[in-house]
Amino acid sequence: MPLKTRVTELLGVEHPIIMGGMTGVGTPELAAAVSNAGGLGIIAIHNAGSPEEGRKWIRRLKLLTNKPFGVNLTILPSMGPPPPYKEYALAIIEEGVKIVETAGSSPKTFVQLFKKAGLITIHKCVSIRHALSAERYGVDIISLDGFECAGHPGEEDIGNFVLQAKGAMALSKPYVCSGGVGTGKQLAAALALGADGVNCGTRFCATKECNWPDSFKQRMVESSETDTVMMLRRLQNTCRVFRNKVAEEVEEIELEKGANFEFSDVSHLVTGKRGREAEKKGDADGGIWSAGQVVGVIDSIPTCEEVIRGMVKEAETTIRSRLTSLVVHQSKL
């Protein structure tokens, strides 16, 4: 039996499970697999390389699924000329996308643009104060990203056990638990804490439909919850990545340089180009790749449908059997 929440009702999906927008792996094929399984698949439009190619990705996704899907627009500071964010946003609107996820810098300008066009908006936040700002901007769903997440967890260092509980106390809009989620028990726990669903990234990277090479996926299966590295912390640009040889080298340089650490000390190691080359070669130690602490609970490489079906079934069992069995009815004497 599906789990019905404010998020499933608002998005029109069967299950309260969202695939977050991800650089590299956020492709139409992976997003379609998640959507077809009853979740919400999301492509990251910047992966397409240009607004025009982004339009083609959206059209391709529409051919792969007739279920709800979303498009991610990540707004980040740039060392050179900024990406054409407005053109990406217009492509999303003009191609008839119904759901958009924003991440990175303040989404105010883009949320207003998307809301005017009638889109449902999701925004990723790593703190309650950012989430409250997003609510004021008119965001429909908050994705509360805990410290456990892959990629950019921010600088707040708040784990999901506190962050999600505080979300229930402070937020009026529905929110989803993001970061470190990969099992049905965690889905049940997120719902118990007040969330209306979960956002999964790394878990969907370790699936048959993900375009990562098998060597990357197998490393995740073999890893533990301690096999990630928090790099670039001294630059206030923290990134959580998988612990491989390159990540450990970056970690060592940052530690050795201390207060004198600069991005140029490791730029040759962390470039996206190097990471993409490593993916092409299937070299899991050849470049940086994002992964959350959830790698510690990943023990197989299933299909997206198997992931979602298994999570929902385990969540239902946890709610119906374990949690209800803990409530003892006292007899009246």
Image: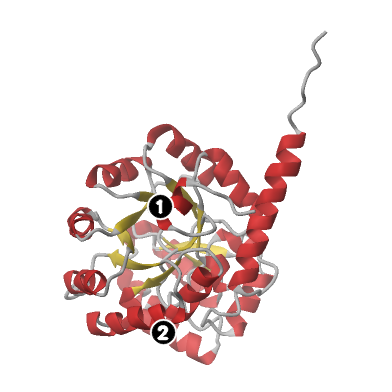
Q: Is residue 100 above or below residue 274?
A: above
Task: Say which residue appears at 66% left-offset and 75% top-offset.
Answer: 301
Give the percent coordinates (x, y) of residue 273.
37, 84
Give the percent coordinates (x, y) of residue 59.
34, 81
Tell me the quarter of the picture where residue 83 sits: bottom left
> In front here: 268 or 192?
192
Tell me the crowding category of disc 1: few under 14, some 14 to 19, or many 20 or more residues within 10 angstroms, Cα based: few
Cα separation between marks 1 and 2: 40 Å
Q: What is the total number of numbered labels drawn onto the structure image?
A: 2
Q: Earlier in the sequence, mark 1 or mark 2?
A: 1
Q: Residue furthest top?
A: 333
Residue identifier under label 1: 10
Give the percent coordinates (x, y) of residue 102.
31, 60
Residue identifier under label 2: 274
- 312 displayed left or right of 121: right
Q: Quadrant of the C terminus?
A: top right
Q: Is residue 259 visible?
A: no
> In front here: 68 or 137?
68
Q: Secondary structure at mark 2?
A: helix
Q: Secondary structure at mark 1?
A: helix
Q: Nearer the viewer, mark 1 or mark 2?
A: 1
> In front here: 91 or 72?
91
> In front here: 36 or 261?
36
Q: Is residue 228 visible?
A: yes
The amino acid at mark 1 is Leu
